[in-house]
Amino acid sequence: MRTLLLVLLIASILFHVPETWTDSRPLFNGNEAYTHLVQQCKFGPRPPGSANLNLCRDYITNRLEAFGWNVVFQHFTYRGVRCVNLVARWPLRGGDASVLLGAHYDTRPKADNDPNPTYRDRPIIGANDGASGVAILMELARALPTDVRSDVELVFFDAEDSGMINGWDWIVGSTHYVKQLSTERMKEIRSMILLDMVGGEDLRFSRELYSSKTLQDKIWSIAHEMDYDHIFLDKPGAYIIDDHRPFLDVGIESLDLIHYPMPWYWHTIEDTQDKCSRTSLEIVGGVLEMFIVGQAVDHIPKTTSSTSERTNTNDTENSPQLSPIHGLGPIMFQLLVAVAACVFLAVFQAEAKR
Ligand code: 1BN
Ligand code: ZN
């Protein structure tokens, strides 16, 4: 009888591990991100200098400000077209974020890859090539715990995707962004992660070849821990000229997360929202959220307590919980408890026999 009671007691301990001790799942919500993707597509094609892109910029700005972020416009002119990068920072610190997350919010003015020649002069909607990366940044702006937001700067690049059309270059917005960085600011930025075509239904990332291997390894290893090896493939991709390049050129560790090989509808009029998936957005957003929270844990000043400060003003209930055993994993934790319980039981029975 006594043994039975003990077994029940141990079982109750095992099944009542406080959720805050075991739950390190991300808060990033794929449905929310998909809504942002659809909203952008509703503005229509969004090439640089277009009225549609202005509306999209207002949409991004308004949503980010509603989540409490400061948004700054960075104007520049390229080939007579007024372009604008958007930079979002969390207001509580002096804009010294060490991680930059970027995505382009413009779309390609021509579907020059379309199999049908009569469509090749049409602009693309850019649900995946444009809207997907932006959608993830916007949802991260909502979902990130408040105490890690100052570590992150969100950058929305203009004029990435008009390369080889009417004499335009690729990556014009990011090139401008890097040019205006002070030497001091360049030193503060520890890593830059670019999201490009991150919402496709059959999402696959190969290891983009210009990207910094150390940063890529960190992201791939988080993805592995989260069981996403089927998406974050451990195989080489290609060298891709993308918005991470200007950062690499000035010595900032950077990574391009880009669907590769390119999906069949890349730069065609078929790049529409039905090719995108809430699940894909949630997977990528979740990996990034874990990366940022992990970075923050690595750099916690020794005098502050991470658990007591972890409050999210927009979504307090759902804040990810960091615990002393964060990173141990629920299964390992339960195993430890089980071993301890067995030892306790053995000692208890030996004592009872004496
Ligand atoms: C990514 C999405 N890119 C364009 N749309 C960059 C790129 C440029 C990719 C040239 C391949 C070739
Ligand atoms: Zn493109």
Image (spheres, rainbow, N blue to C red):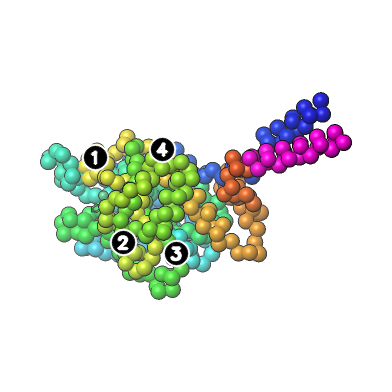
**Residue at the image position 41 percent from the left and 69 percent from the top:** 186
Residue 278 got which mark? 4
What residue does disc 3 label? 190
Point out the tag, 2 or 1, that comes first from the N-terminus.
Answer: 2
Which percent across, then down, holds residue 275? 31, 36
Which quadrant is home to the N terminus?
Answer: top right
* Amino acid bearing label 3: Arg
Point out the tag, 1 or 3, that comes first from the N-terminus.
Answer: 3
Point out the tag, 1 or 4, that comes first from the N-terminus.
Answer: 1
Which percent across, then down, holds residue 150? 52, 60
**Discs 2/4, front:** 2
What residue does disc 2 label? 245
* Amino acid bearing label 2: Arg
**Residue at the image position 65 percent from the left and 64 percent from the top:** 303
Measured in 3D between alpha carbons, the distance from the residue under mark 3 to the one under mark 2, in whole angstroms, is: 15 Å
Can residue 349 be found in the magenta stretch?
A: yes
* Badge 2 element: helix
**Residue at the image position 24 percent from the left and 49 percent from the top:** 108
Point out the tag, 2 or 4, that comes first from the N-terminus.
Answer: 2
Point out the tag, 3 or 2, that comes first from the N-terminus.
Answer: 3
Q: Residues within 10 Å of mark 1 (few under 14, many from 20)?
A: few
Viewer-side residue, 252 vs 120: 252
Rendered view: 71 above or below 135: below
**Discs 1/4, front:** 1
The span shown in magenta is 334-354
Which percent across, then down, holds residue 97? 48, 63
Query: Which residue reaches farthest top?
Result: 1
Measured in 3D between alpha carbons, the distance from the residue under mark 1 to the one under mark 3, in whole angstroms, is: 34 Å
Residue 264 got which mark? 1
Q: Residues within 10 Å of mark 2 (few under 14, many from 20)?
A: many
* Badge 4 element: helix
